[in-house]
Image (cartoon, rainbow, N blue to C red):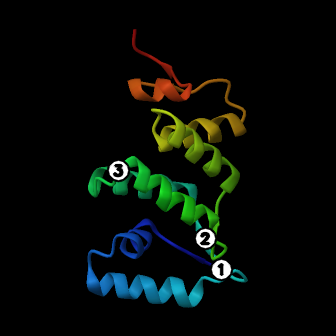
Amino acid sequence: MIGLDTNVLVRYIVRDDAKQTAAATRLIESQCTAETPGFVSQLVLAELFWVLSRGYEYPKSVRVEVFTKLLGSAELEVEDAADAWVALRAFAAGPADFADLLIGLRGRSAGCETIFTFDKSAVKSGFHTLLP
């Protein structure tokens, strides 16, 4: 199994740099198979979501489509994919941020009763704010 960094997935998805896109495509399409999938960590998922949202301004519907394909790919093994699916579905259905949802799910899986933040939008994901 090989691990895939965020920038490799960005080049494969966005295709905005011919040389890096070609290298990412060769790597993913030749080395990531159903028998030996490429590993995608949850940190990479969160970074990828942020890059597609903020860096490339992909609309919500496109990010949901990209992540649905990524999570459903037999050629990729996503770390704790069940939590990623839950976060993606909640993101698609509501206003909360994907990364915040994923952080909340991972915290609850680790036994956290609550998660504190200064991010007002994260409160939508069940976090508790430290601000009045």
Identity, as a three-letter code, of the amino acid under mark 3: Pro
Which circle's residue, 2 or 3, is located before the other in the chain? 2
Q: Foreground: 59 or 31?
A: 59
Residue 59, which numbered label? Answer: 3
Distance from disc 2 to disc 3, alpha carbons, whole Å, reads 26 Å
| Quadrant (top left/top right/bottom left/bottom right) for the C terminus | top left
Q: Dot 1: within a 10 Å radius of its alpha carbon, few (fewer than 14), some, or many (20 or more) residues?
A: few
Dot 2 crowding, Cα within 10 Å, few <14, some 14–19, many 20+: some
Residue 80 visible from this viewpoint: no
Identify residue for label 2.
39
- C-alpha span from label 3 to label 1: 32 Å
**Numbered badge on residue 1:** 1
Locate residue 14, reporting x and y percent: 34, 70
- Classify residue 61 as left or right of residue 91: left
The type of residue carrying mark 2 is: Phe
Q: Position of residue 43 (x, y in %)?
A: 51, 55
Q: At x 49% / y 43%, what residue is drawn?
A: 98
Q: How many marks?
A: 3
Mark earlier in primary sequence (3, 1): 1
Q: Nearer the viewer, mark 2 or mark 3?
A: 3
Residue at the (61%, 50%) spot, across then down? 84
- Label 3 sits on a secondary structure element that is loop
Relative to 63, residue 97 above or below:
above
Question: Quick check: can you spot residue 68?
Answer: yes
Q: Residue furthest top?
A: 132
Left or right of 117 in this view: 80: right
Label 3: few (<14), some (14–19) or many (≥20) C-alpha neighbours in 10 Å? few
- Residue type highlighted by circle 1: Met
> Residue 122: where, in percent of width, then height?
46, 29
